[in-house]
Image (cartoon, coloured by chain):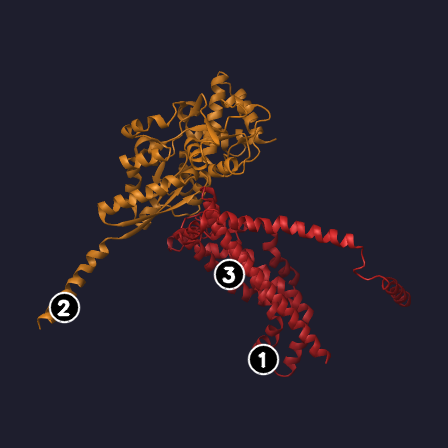
């Protein structure tokens, strides 16, 4: 049985060895490249170019004044705050969850993995409504919060909560496969050599996952700044107080201030481009890092 | 020696005057309003701040929040701490009293004209040259006409739209309810998309170019014409429409807690003043103050307007018969 499988495998290998992976006729290759490029142009480059042309339609003066408008500044500020709080929280949670899942066996592990994926499965609007139902005046803690002068819903805390909710799978999801592939040999070796738990975490685990972690953080940040649905439900849309950048864009657009709307949108697009550049850099670094590690282990 | 003494005196004077300076307070109010009032309240808030500064010396900043009227009321019920609400219709404010007990039952009697400082009505907005020849409500029932109107479940304007069409149908069918329902059903068959607020529907119609006719607040139709050019859209005045009274009130529980009742009350009362009415009229809301109404007479077309109390027995009844879960609107909108 085993022998036949092996011989079949060998035969298969010799058969495909005659053809190289890139030996398709030129027209096939070029057609596919053209389709991919046309798709990219249509769905990515044209809208991106449109955002910037619309933003600058009325000149630099309108563009800049749209960005320094007090409501716009407050929206930018709130977006940065929400991302700045959501990111570290997700960092701690993501590393802890991925570490537990990848390095240990325990009951309910698959339930935990499913729970981490929940924000991907749940619509962002529902995510927002969850917090309205919990912290709203008619919700579980609403009356108590009002009595104690604590504001959660329609204020910054709920915006942060909603942002954390929609972004929390990113880091864990990025790290789990990476850590599983790395296995726990190095940690076990460190343990045998007498390292403490913290030493293992700081000197073995974290250095191994640093590029994956960075990549996850970039994704988290991008989503945190761009989130619309969940934040829209819990924001209350108070101008200059609880509007994030995506909400501010919608308001401007609905008030016939198209140039200003696109100016703020272009700022979001710029953030996305910076994120993209960072992401490419991180990918390049991590690939280089992996190649170096491989070379070292081969020597 | 002399200089030293005067320095001391100067310090004393500053210390003594500090409480006087801090007496001029910074106050903030939150006005939770419906969709099309954005431009109106930007202008009015600035005017009120100036008036209040002159009167009391206090600086007041009014924050705004806008959305579909029903949705905004829901926000206040869920804890959006509005000092005042200025919504599209009284039923939504009634709900704030009924569901969250934030205001007394008789809130609408506290200010003149049913607490509605300005009124409006519902008109039809069509594309330049009126290519589909739309003249009145019955043209909206014709097959092949695409009608834009928001969702009556979330939008106040949408409910006025619906009731205006319904009232027209009642009048032309000897008050036959079944025929009126059929009439409105035909209109909603022609609606490709229901946005959640009036402004959403306006942008669908004017910006995205969807639809042949927009059923719209009069003020919203004028504003779209002004913002995007009278060469692009025309207002069609139907033979019959409804008198829309968008009411205002302070939210008692909130202003008592935040200690803003005096300024919140003054904010709403100033809407009835000469200046407040002038700003409303400039933003295409029909003023209630006689003197201002006279000045802007030419701006507003004269339409035969029915009142909701006369035809539908008030908002509580209209809401129950037409817009509650499983009521007329739900029945006719099922396709």
> Tag 1's secondary structure?
loop
What chain is the red one? A
Mark found first going from the N terminus, 3 or 1: 3
Disc 2, SS: helix
**A13 to B79, vertically: above or below:** below
Chain for disc number 2: B
Q: Give the image location of residue B286, x and y in percent.
A: 35, 30
Decide: is A76 above or below A58.
Answer: below
In the picture, measured across the screen, residue B74 lies left or right of residue B290, that is right
Mark nearest the camera among 2 and 1 is 2
Which chain is mark 3 on? A
User: Which residue does the numbered mark 2 point to in the structure image?
Assistant: B7
Residue A134 visible in the current orientation: no
Q: Where in the figure is residue A41, as x and y percent of width and height?
A: 63, 50
Callout 3 and callout 1 share a chain: yes
The verdict on a common chain for dots 2 and 3 is no
- Given contact means CB atoms under 8 Å apart, are the residues at marks 2 and 1 in contact? no
Q: Residue at x 47, y 52 (%)?
A: A245
Which circle marks residue A86 in the picture? Answer: 3
Which quarter of the rendered picture does the C terminus of chain A lie within?
A: bottom right
Camera-nearest residue between A164 and A287: A287
- Please give the label number shown on residue A196: 1
Residue A125 located left or right of residue A187: left
Q: Which mark is residue A30?
A: none
> In which image quadrant can residue B113 be found?
top left
């Amino acid at each position: 049985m085993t022998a036949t499988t092996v011989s079949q495998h060998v035969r298969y290998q010799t058969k495909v060895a005659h053809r190289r992976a890139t030996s398709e006729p030129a027209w096939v290759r070029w057609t596919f490249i053209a389709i991919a490029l046309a798709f990219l142009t249509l769905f990515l480059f044209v809208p991106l170019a449109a955002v910037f042309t619309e933003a600058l339609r009325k000149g630099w003066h309108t563009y800049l004044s749209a960005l320094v408008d007090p409501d716009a500044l407050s929206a930018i500020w709130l977006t940065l705050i929400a991302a700045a709080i959501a990111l570290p929280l997700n960092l701690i949670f993501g590393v802890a969850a991925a570490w537990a899942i990848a390095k240990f066996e325990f009951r309910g592990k698959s339930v935990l993995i499913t729970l981490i994926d929940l924000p991907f499965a749940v619509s962002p609007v529902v995510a927002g409504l969850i917090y309205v139902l919990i912290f709203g005046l008619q919700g579980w803690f609403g009356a108590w919060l009002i009595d104690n002068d604590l504001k959660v819903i329609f204020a910054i805390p709920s915006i942060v909560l909603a942002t954390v909710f929609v972004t929390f799978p990113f880091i864990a999801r990025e790290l789990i496969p990476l850590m599983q592939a790395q296995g726990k040999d190095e940690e076990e070796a460190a343990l045998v050599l007498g390292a403490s738990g913290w030493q293992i975490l700081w000197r073995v685990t974290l250095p191994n996952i640093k590029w994956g972690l960075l990549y996850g953080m970039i994704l988290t940040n991008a989503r945190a700044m761009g989130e619309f649905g969940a934040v829209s439900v819990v924001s209350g849309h108070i101008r200059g107080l609880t509007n994030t950048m995506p909400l501010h864009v919608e308001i401007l657009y609905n008030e016939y201030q198209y140039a200003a709307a696109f100016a703020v949108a272009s700022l979001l697009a710029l953030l996305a481009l910076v994120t993209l550049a960072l992401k490419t850099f991180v990918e390049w670094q991590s690939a280089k890092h992996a190649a170096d590690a491989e070379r070292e282990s081969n020597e | 020696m002399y200089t030293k003494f005067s320095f001391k005196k100067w310090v004393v004077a500053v210390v003594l005057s500090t409480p006087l300076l801090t007496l001029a307070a910074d106050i903030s109010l939150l006005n939770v309003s419906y969709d099309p009032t954005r431009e109106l309240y930007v202008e009015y808030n600035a005017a009120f701040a100036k008036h209040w500064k002159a009167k009391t010396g206090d600086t007041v900043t009014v924050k705004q929040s806008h959305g579909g009227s029903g949705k905004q009321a829901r926000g206040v019920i869920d804890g959006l701490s509005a000092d005042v609400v200025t919504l599209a219709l009284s039923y939504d404010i009634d709900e704030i009293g009924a569901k969250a007990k934030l205001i007394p039952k008789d809130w609408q009697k506290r200010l003149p004209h049913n607490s509605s400082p300005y009124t409006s009505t519902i008109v039809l907005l069509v594309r330049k040259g009126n290519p589909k020849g739309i003249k009145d409500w019955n043209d909206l029932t014709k097959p092949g006409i695409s009608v834009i109107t928001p969702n009556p479940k979330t939008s106040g304007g949408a409910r006025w739209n619906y009731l205006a069409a319904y009232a027209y149908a009642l009048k032309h069918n000897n008050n036959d309810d079944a025929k009126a329902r059929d009439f409105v059903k035909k209109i909603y068959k022609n609606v490709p998309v229901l946005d959640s607020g009036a402004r959403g529907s306006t942008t669908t119609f004017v910006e995205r170019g969807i639809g042949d006719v927009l059923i719209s607040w009069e003020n919203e139709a004028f504003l779209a014409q002004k913002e995007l050019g009278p060469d692009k859209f025309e207002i069609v005045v139907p033979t019959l429409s409804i008198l829309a009274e968008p009411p205002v009130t302070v939210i008692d529980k909130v202003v008592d807690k935040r200690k803003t009742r005096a300024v919140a009350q003054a904010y709403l009362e100033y809407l009835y003043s000469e200046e407040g009415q002038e700003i409303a009229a400039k933003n295409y809301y029909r003023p209630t103050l006689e003197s201002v109404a006279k000045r802007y007479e030419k701006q507003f077309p004269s339409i035969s307007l029915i009142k909701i109390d006369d035809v539908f027995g008030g908002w509580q009844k209209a809401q129950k018969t037409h817009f509650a879960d499983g009521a007329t609107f739900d029945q006719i909108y099922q396709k």
